[in-house]
Image (tube, rainbow, N blue to C red):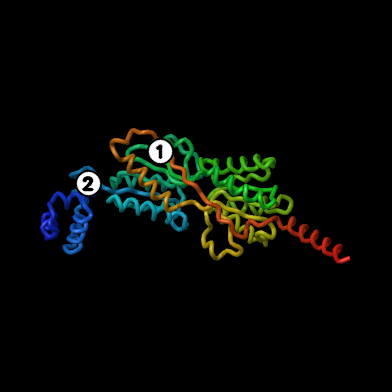
Amino acid sequence: MPPNQKELAKLAGVSAGTVSNVISGSTKVSERSRQKVLEAIRILKYQPNLIARSLKTNRTHTLGIVVPDITIPFFPKIIRGAECAARERGYFLIVLDSEGSPLREADMIALLRAQRVEGILLVTAGGQELSSERLASLTSSSPVVCLDRLPMDLDVDSVCVDDCGAAEMAISHLMGMGHTEIAIITGPLTLQNEQERLRGYRQALKKGGIPVRSSLVWDGSFEQEHVARMCQNGLLLPANRPSALFATNGVTGLAALRSLYAVGLRTPKDFSFVTFDEVTAEDFFRPGVTSVVQPTFDMGYQAVEVLLRRIDKENAGGPRENVRLPATLKVRDSSNVPYVMESKKLASLGRSSRIQQR
């Protein structure tokens, strides 16, 4: 017979109630008592009957998270933060991958609810407007917290960076390098955060006295083939080529960077490049890619904290929480001064030197 909580209490030298509180995480106990119970659990190899406990308490102490592509390093970092916060509070975290499909995303959310999770963290697949039916399915039953990608008109708690401010920081950096022809390639503008990043781009140019040209604003997607076609058939053509390019997310940025290399262009020789999020295998890119870096671990961690506050009955009907974290700009070689400007500067210095020698 498997050990029960009474046997755990006897071995640990504590009450059965203390054992129950340690296992459920529902009430704080002293660290000394908690360690005694945990040691007894290890010795007796105790496995709690989660199904029986959930039927008794109507609580599963389980959360779910759905991400669009678990192979992109950005998302496992969010998951690590979420799992850490969940574990500290006695919760389990179920991780599911929607594979970038809105239909699969809906199936994954339905599966989590069938498993009676108490709340869901969602990085949406994006790419299309949300129907009223899908909106209803996302906001019904279990509480939802959206991370990073924020659907338009979805009234849920959210955790992301200050998208507008982060994009403005990136464009200001490029302008500080002397760039005036700065193109932007976005993800789906059906997402609120993509629109905020576009707003930051426009805001930075306006502050710098540079007019926004529609020919330099490219509405992209999360599909690498689509982004590649946009770049190779338009943005990177010699007649349209800007002196700098800003990508508003890592997926789009990586596709643009690959397209750039495919047509024989290089950064910063042919033009400067900055992307939101650090691209896959960043350390292998030469020159290194200047990136807007999001605090991914903190995003996941704080999203769980927001979700648990929403699960709390006392806060269930409270106002929405919209947590906005600061991003940082990691400057590398890809965002150097415009090559043409640098060539002119070197030529001018050469002429000056020859004059002095005379």
Toward which corner of the image does residue 114 lie, by quadrant?
top left
Say if 146 sits above or below 352 in the image.
above
Say if 332 sits above or below 126 in the image.
below
Q: Which amino acid lies under the numbered mark 2 shown in the image of this protein?
A: Thr
Q: Nearer the viewer, mark 2 or mark 1?
A: 2
Q: Quick one: SS at disc 1?
A: loop
User: In terms of depth relative to the viewer, which is nearer, 252 or 108?
Assistant: 252
- Quadrant in which the C terminus is drawn: bottom right
Q: Which mark is residue 27?
A: 2
Q: Is residue 291 visible?
A: yes
Q: CA distance from mark 2 to mark 1?
A: 25 Å
- Image point 65% across, 59% down: which residue? 267
| Residue 153 image offset from top left, x and y in percent | 47, 35
- Image point 31% across, 53% down: which residue? 87
Estimate how packed mark 2 is, as few (under 14), some (14 to 19) or many (20 or more) residues with alpha carbons within 10 Å. few
Q: Quick one: SS at disc 2?
A: loop
Residue annotated with mark 1: 321
| Residue 157 image offset from top left, x and y in percent | 40, 39
Say left or right for 284 vs 305: right
Q: Is residue 242 visible?
A: no
Toward which corner of the image does residue 14 lie, by quadrant?
bottom left
Q: Earlier in the sequence, mark 2 or mark 1?
A: 2
User: In terms of depth relative to the viewer, which is nearer, 75 or 115?
Assistant: 75
Say if 357 sits above or below 245 in the image.
below
Q: Which amino acid lies under the numbered mark 1 shown in the image of this protein?
A: Glu
Estimate how packed mark 1 is, as few (under 14), some (14 to 19) or many (20 or more) residues with alpha carbons within 10 Å. some
